[in-house]
Image (cartoon, grey):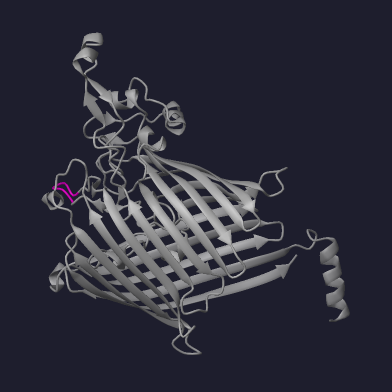
Amino acid sequence: MSMKKKLLATILSVLPLAAAAQTYELDWDVSLSGSGSTAGNLPFWAVTGRNGIVPDARNGLLVAGTDFRYASRSDIRVYSGLKLSGSVSSSSSSASSSAWNGMVNELYAGVGWKKLRLDLGMIDREISYGGLSLTGGDIVWSGNTRALPGYNLQVDYFNVPGTKGIFSIKANYADCMFLDRRYVRNALLHNKSLFFRFRLHPRVHLQLGLEQWSVWGGVSPDYGKQPRSFNDYLRVVLGMSGGGDATMSDQINVLGDHRGRELIQVDWTADAFTLSFAHDIPFDDGSGMGFQNFPDGVNTIFFSFHEKDRWVSDILYEFVYTKCQSGPRHARPAKPDELERDPDKHSYIMGGNDNYFNNGAYRSGWTYYGRTIGLPLFTPSPVNGDGLVLGVCNNRVVAHHLAIAGKVARKIPYRFKATYSRNYGKYTNSLSIFSSVPEQLSLALEVTLPRLGRSLPVSLSAGLYGDVGELYPDNFGLTLSLSWAGRWRHEKLD
C-alpha cells in the first residue's frame, strides 16, 4: 500500500465523519414476458403474490423499474424508485377482445437513518420467506395487490436500552388512500403495528406482534359523506366509537372498518440453517382480538439453509384454517326473560361470524383493484353490474401449502409450490358453488436461467402453472420472461 493510501486510511479511522464516504447506487430492471393458458384466465399461481402487476387474462407484459439510493457514512440514506408496467391481455383467442393496460406500480421517495425510515408514495412492502409463502408472512397484507399511495414511518428491530439485547422492538405508523373504484368512494386507510422480540437463547428468538388496519372516511351511497375531521381521525387511531355524525353501527362499535392480525413466531438460528414457526391470526373485531376465533390462522414452518447453492435450500409448509370465525352467529335474539327485563333490547352480541375481509358499510371489503389484499385463498366476489367487487365470497378455508426452492445442479434457481384447499364460502353464502365444499389444487414450477451468455446480461425465466378442482376451471398455463437487470455504483470520499 502506498504512503498516500496509508495516510488516508489512518485519517478515516481516527476521524470517520470528517471524511465521510458517500455511496450512490442505481438499479434497473426491464422484463418482457408472454403467457398463455388453456382456459380464459391464467392459473392461480401465475397471478398471485405479484403485487397486482400480472393481469388475470392471458397477456404480454412489459415491466420496467429503477431504484436510486444514496448513503452516507453517517447512516443517512436517501432513496427513490419508479416501476411501470404495460400489458396486452385477452381472455380469448380473438384479437378483437384484446386490451392494453398501463399503470404505475411504484412511485416513491424516502429517507432513512439507522433503524428508522420514512417512505412516501406508492412502494411495495417487503415480504418474508423468499416468495414461497401464501401470505408473504402477513395474513392481512400479502403482496397480492398494488401498493397504495401514502406514507409509512417505520423503525426496524432495535434493542431496548438496559436489556443487553434480550428485548427489542419494531413498529410502524402509516396512512394511505384507495385509488380503485369502490362502494365507498375516496376511502382512507390507517395502519399501525407494534412487534416485540425476546432473545430466549443466543440462537432462539420469540416474536409477538399486533398489526391493525382501519378503513374510514369516504362517501357512501347509503350513508353519504362519512366523518373525516381530525377528531374522527383520532377516533380511528384509538379504536373509539364514532360521534353523532357517524352511522349508528359506528356509534355503537368503532368508527370505520377495522381488522388486523396477531403474530406469534419462534426462530432458531443454527450454524447452517434457520428454522421458524409462526402462527398468524386474523381478526375483524373484538372477538377475534380476544382469541375467540381460535384455531383460525396461518401456521407456517420454514426451514432455510444459509448456503443457497443447494439442490434444496428452502422448504416451507403452511396449514390454513379459517372456519371458526368466533362461531356462526354474531348476535342472538333476546330470550323471553331478557325481554321482560329490557323490552328495548331485542338482541345480544355473541361476537361470532367475524366474516373476515368483509364489512357492512365499506362493502368493497379488504380488496383492491379486484384482488384480495390479504390471504389470497379468500376469493373475491364476482364483479357486479356496477363494475364493483363487494368484498370476498369465500373466507372459510382449510388448506395445505408446500413450497420448495433451490438450484438445479447448484446453478439454476427454481421454486415449486403446491396448494390444496377446501372452500366453505361464508357462514351466509350467496353463491351456489358453496352449497357444496369445492376442493382445489394449484401448482407452480418456476425456473430462472441467470444469464444467457457471458457478455449478454439477460436472464430467461419460465413458469408452469396448473389448476385442478372445483373452485377454478381446470387450467394449464405457461409464462416466459426475458429480463435485463443492472447496477451502477459510485463511491467517493468527501
Evaluate whether residue 155 shows in this view. yes
Query: Residue 359 placed where, x, y %?
Result: 28, 38
Q: Is residue 209 magenta?
A: no
Residue 369 seen from this side: no
Q: Position of residue 267 (x, y in %)?
A: 55, 57
Q: Is the stretch drawn in magenta largely helix, strand or loop? A: loop
**Closer to us: 241 or 350:** 350
* Residue most extreme to the left: 432
Is 384 within the magenta? yes
- State left or right for residue 85 relative to residue 490: left
Quarter of the figure that contains the N terminus? bottom right
Towards the viewer: 322 or 71: 322
How many numbered marks are there? 0
**Is 256 located above or below residue 461 in the figure?**
above
In this rendering, position of residue 130 left or right of residue 244: right
Residue 36: give x, y in percent of width and height: 23, 75
Residue in view at x 42 percent, y 49 percent? 280
Q: Quadrant of residue 421?
A: bottom left
- Identified at 16% across, 46% down, the residue is 386
What x and y, as percent, mark residue 231? 44, 26
The part of the chain drawn in magenta is 383-387
Residue 162 vertical placement versus 401 (above, below): above
From this viewpoint, which residue is outermost toward the top? 341
Q: Quadrant of residue 399?
A: bottom left
State the residue at coordinates (27%, 23%). 348
Kindly identify the residue that appears in the image at 19 percent across and 15 percent down. Answer: 336
Of 149 and 479, the residue lying toward us: 479
Quarter of the figure with residue 479: bottom left
In the picture, the quarter occupied by the C terminus is: bottom right
Left/right placement of residue 485 relative to residue 219 reads right
